[in-house]
Structure formats: structure tokens, C-alpha cells
Image (cartoon, grey):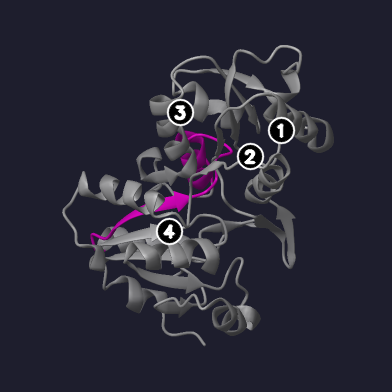
Amino acid sequence: MISGSFREIVEQYEVVFFDSFGVLRNYDGMIPGVEKTFAFLRENNIDFYILTNDASRGPKELANKFQEMGLEEITRSKIISSGMLARNYLRNKVKNGTVTYLGTEKSAHYIETAGLKTLRIQDLSLKDIDHINAMVLLDDEGYDWQGDVNKAINLLRMRNMPVIVANTDLTYPVSKGKIALAVGALADMIEKIVQKSFIRFGKPDTQMFNFAYEHVLHTRLVDKNKILMVGDTLETDIIGGNKFGIDTALVLTGNTPPEKAKMNIESTGIIPDYICSSAAV
């Protein structure tokens, strides 16, 4: 099932887009051997960016997490997060008022850097909502699931406003063989209950890849056929890269375990250009 070594694949490209969780790191820390990959990229003048649906914290803190694991090459300028697209939307479409959010206080970075006031959903009173102009679903933690989710639902029933989902992931792995509910799944549930359409940012939407490609073009001119997307999830990383028209490599260190890769590809019809055991060279 594995189509080749990652070294042989990646040396054909000028730029690599990496997913984060399940590709470079997991619940145990850094994926073994990944540090050699970044040394190889540097030696061969291959550029890279991290495309992540993680809106739990800002780009600087996301980069710091990698640097703490020894991946010094990953700086904040290399981070492309779905939260950054959500921030751009807020800047352009929600010009005043207060934005309430589900997530940690660190995740509110994306709202605050858009120049807007923030209010955690748990601090919101449903008796005083006239100043609330938008809601953002940022992270899986930082709030009481029953009380605060119910409050969010009732707020949306009482007041019409845009709802921005800054992470489209449905689940994330918490240990070998176990997953947890992610904010994308929570958004699906709330959207169905309140019968309203939410605005989503992140993979697999082409907008995320366009945003990353614009960052690439600021530093070098490169054709899309020289960009490789590396991910562990067919439904976000791989189909997103396929739709954008770049080559894709599925690694088997995260959401797609080796024993299920063939079955998942056949059942979804999402076909990567390459399959590798990991992103280690």
C-alpha cells in the first residue's frame, strides 16, 4: 500500500504544505524522524508551511510549540491557520460591537487582533445581547460543554448574527486508537438545531489553500505542480489539496492508520498521489 519513501517524493517539489497534528506531532510529541525532514528541506532549498485547522492559539504560540520540541525551523511566519482566515473575515465583515466565542482565552487572539471586543460565552448574559454582533467557534476546550453550548444555542435563537467556525475538524486523536469530538462536529450539531448556515474556514476549503499559496508567492514564484500537500486525513488534507490542484501525500501516522488506509481510500473515493508510512526522510 505504501507507494514510496518520503525522501524520494519530497525532493521533487519546491514547496511543501504540512498538516500539523498526525503528521509532525501527536499526543506523544514529535513524530519520530521528522526533525531530519526539516534539515533535509533546508539543505535542498525546499520551502514549507504548516497548514492547520488548529485555532486554539495564535501563530506565535503554535510555532513555539514546535520549537519546544526541537523544530526550530518552524517560526510564526511558517504557520497558516484557519484562525487567520476567520480573523480576516471578522476584520472585513464585523466592524464593531462585541464578538462572543466558544474556546480558550488564548484562542480569542484571532478576534482581538481583528480589533474587536471579545466576550467568552460563559460570561454572557442572555438578558443583555444587543451588543453581540457575531459568534466564533474557536476551540474544543475552555468552556462548559452543557451550560455554555446551551447558552450559545439560545443566543442564536434570540439574535440573528454571523457564526464563524474557525476549525472544521470533526475529531482529533487523543491516544492510539481513540479520538475526541472537535469543534467542527460541535458546529454541525448547533447549526442543525438553530437551522442557520455557519461560515467555515479551514481545510478542505480551497480558500485555505489559496491563502497559503499567496504566502508562498510573497517569497518565491512557484507553479502549483511544484507544491506538495502532506496530511494524515483524507477528508481534509488530501481532498483539499486535490481540489486545489496540487499533489498530495497521505501519511499513516495519524487519522489514517496503515490497516485502514486502503479501505478508507476505496470507500471515500479520495485518492492521494502518494502514500507514505510517515513524513520522516
Question: What amino acid type should be assigned to the residue bearing mark 4?
Answer: Phe
| Residue at the spot of label 4 | 18
Q: Which mark is residue 142?
A: 1
Distance from the alpha carbon under mark 2 to that under mark 1: 7 Å
Mark identifier at residue 139: 2
Q: Quadrant of residue 89?
A: top left
Extreme residue toward the left, this view: 221
Answer left or right for 184 relative to 16. Answer: right
Q: Nearer the viewer, mark 1 or mark 4?
A: 1
Residues rendered magenta in the picture: 44-68
Q: Is residue 1 left or right of residue 170?
A: left
Tell me, for residue 90, which label it has, or none.
Answer: 3
Q: Residue at x 60, y 13 (%)?
A: 131
Instruction: Identify the element where label 1 is drawn.
Output: loop
**Is residue 8 placed above or below 174 in the rendered structure?**
below
Contact (Cβ within 8 Å) of mark 1 with mark 3: no
Q: Are marks 2 and 1 in contact (CB under 8 Å)?
A: yes
- Residue 144: image x %, image y %? 80, 33
Question: Could you tell which of marks 1 and 4 lies nearer the N-terminus?
Answer: 4
